[in-house]
Image: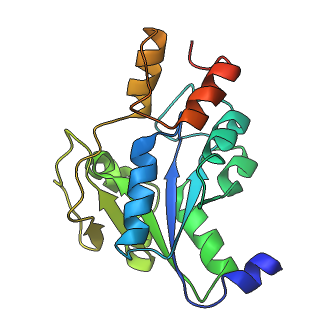
Amino acid sequence: MLLLMMYNYGMKIGLFGGSFDPPHSGHLKIANTLIAKKYCDVIWFVPCAQHPYQKDISSASHRFAMLKTFKNFSICAYELNKNSTSYSIETLEYFQKLFPNDTFIWIVGSDQLADFKKWYRYEDILKNFQVLVYPRTGFPFDNMLPGIIKLEHVENIDISSTQIKNLLQEKKSIESYTTPEIIKYIKDNELYQ
């Protein structure tokens, strides 16, 4: 009930979906930029249980715990609790029903644009919600559909979770790619070896 009272007054809530396996500095930079540039009032990270296009992701509990180290942001376990394939439209509709006075913005990287028309009920996402796209290196803003908002004036995010996992398997440093808290968590839990 407290959560309903807290958010029941017309906020712009950014839902930042992804596998976050692991979360990295790029995710944090985008979230901070969206708040600073007033695209969103708050950001909720929404880790998926099972990604429709990815296999072999780390356990939900590890990914959730790593995201919790991001201070000043909320972590939403809705998709993790479903324990099945996550579809963005279902998550957006769930939160819109819970918080009808708020505006929900789905946040994705430009790497998702090429396949956006393959997303489950993508037309409903564009019709009923805002979609904000941030730049990813190697993925230009091609295939922009009407209704998608391009995050302007932010440098490309030149980092990926896959890149971090590859560096860890090669026994290389990831210090410039993620936070000290996440590095500690990865080491303590012997992830991505």
Picture layout, residue 129 above or below residue 31: below
Picture layout, residue 121 above or below residue 97: above
Identified at 73% across, 37% down, the residue is 61
Residue 164 or 162: which is nearer the viewer? 164
Identified at 55% across, 54% down, the residue is 87
Identified at 74% across, 81% down, the residue is 4
Query: Is 47 on the left-hand or right-hand side of 177?
Result: right
Please state the total of marks drawn on the protein image. 0
Residue 38 or 137: which is nearer the viewer? 38
Snapshot quadrant of residue 39: bottom left
Picture layout, residue 117 above or below residue 40: above
Give the farthest residue toward the top: 170
Instruction: Determine if residue 193 is in view.
Output: yes
Residue 156 or 77: which is nearer the viewer? 156
The colouring scheme, among rainbow, by chain, secondary structure or one colour, is: rainbow
Snapshot quadrant of residue 143: bottom left
Q: Position of residue 48 (x, y in %)?
A: 60, 46
Q: Quadrant of the C terminus?
A: top right
Query: Is 109 on the left-hand or right-hand side of 49?
Result: left
Q: Position of residue 78 (x, y in %)?
A: 69, 57
Snapshot quadrant of residue 76: bottom right
Identified at 39% across, 56% down, the residue is 30
Q: Position of residue 137 (x, y in %)?
A: 22, 41
Query: Is 79 on the left-hand or right-hand side of 35?
Result: right
Instruction: Determine if residue 123 is in view.
Output: no
Picture layout, residue 131 above or below residue 49: below
Give the farthest residue toward the right: 1
Q: Position of residue 36 (x, y in %)?
A: 39, 70
Q: Quadrant of the N terminus?
A: bottom right
